[in-house]
Amino acid sequence: MNPIHLNVEGSVEIVVSATEDAFEPRARVCAQEIADKLGLGPQRATAANVVKARLPRHKLERVNAFIEANLSRRLHVEDLAAVAHMSPFHFTRLFKQATGLSPHAYLTFHRIERAKRMLAESGLALVEVAACVGFQTQGHFTEVFRRHAGITPRRFRVRREAGA
């Protein structure tokens, strides 16, 4: 399910993604057909030019560690890309491929999961929990929490305390 990059003479890059590994051979053929339509025939665009792009595990682990350590801060894709030593565009594409989520969705997921732990394990006020997990206001925190957890933070805490 990796994007197929077809580099032709260093001046054209054709990127085709297959949604399943079984479709990868078709995606390769599609990339080659695009090259042919552009007049960059098979003699110039060979299978040797096809490269599968991946986000190396060590870079993903470094980004995860950075997210965990800086969850309370406002984080941007540029920050995460810098940790991985990549351009924001390239990082975003490979990150989504590796995790199945965009960097923003991934970050939001981790913020909500940490908030759930904090709500269950601490007596901090909701506004403090919101700040600890990187939300600027309690209102925004409540809105995002409800969207992801299906319940408000206050109700989540009450149910946890009641043992439900």
Image (tube, rainbow, N blue to C red):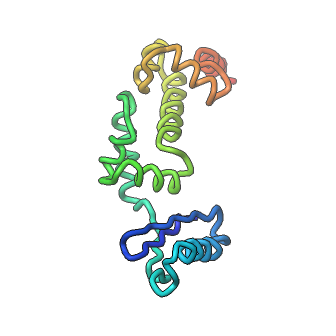
**Residue 163: x, y in percent?**
66, 22
Instruction: Classify 49 as above or below 52.
Output: below
Q: Is 7 above or below relative to 1?
A: below
Q: Residue 153 vs residue 92: left or right?
A: right
Q: Nearer the viewer, residue 132 or 106?
A: 106
Q: Is residue 49 depicted above or below 61 in this figure? A: below
Q: Residue furthest front?
A: 39
**Residue 110: image location, x then y, percent:** 49, 36
Residue sitting nearer the eye, 27 or 10: 10
Residue at 52%, 20% in the rendered image: 141
Between 103 and 57, the one lying in front of the other is 103
Q: Please name the residue shown 51% across and 77% down the image.
A: 39
Residue at left offset 53%, top offset 36%: 109
**Extreme residue toward the bottom, this view:** 43
Picture quarter with the N terminus: bottom right
Which image quadrant is residue 28 in? bottom right
Is the C terminus in the top left, top right, bottom left or bottom right quadrant? top right
- The percent coordinates of residue 162 (x first, y second) are 66, 18
Q: How many marks?
A: 0
Q: Is residue 48 above or below residue 138?
A: below
The x and y percentages for residue 40 are 49, 78
Residue in the image at 58% along x and 20% along y: 143
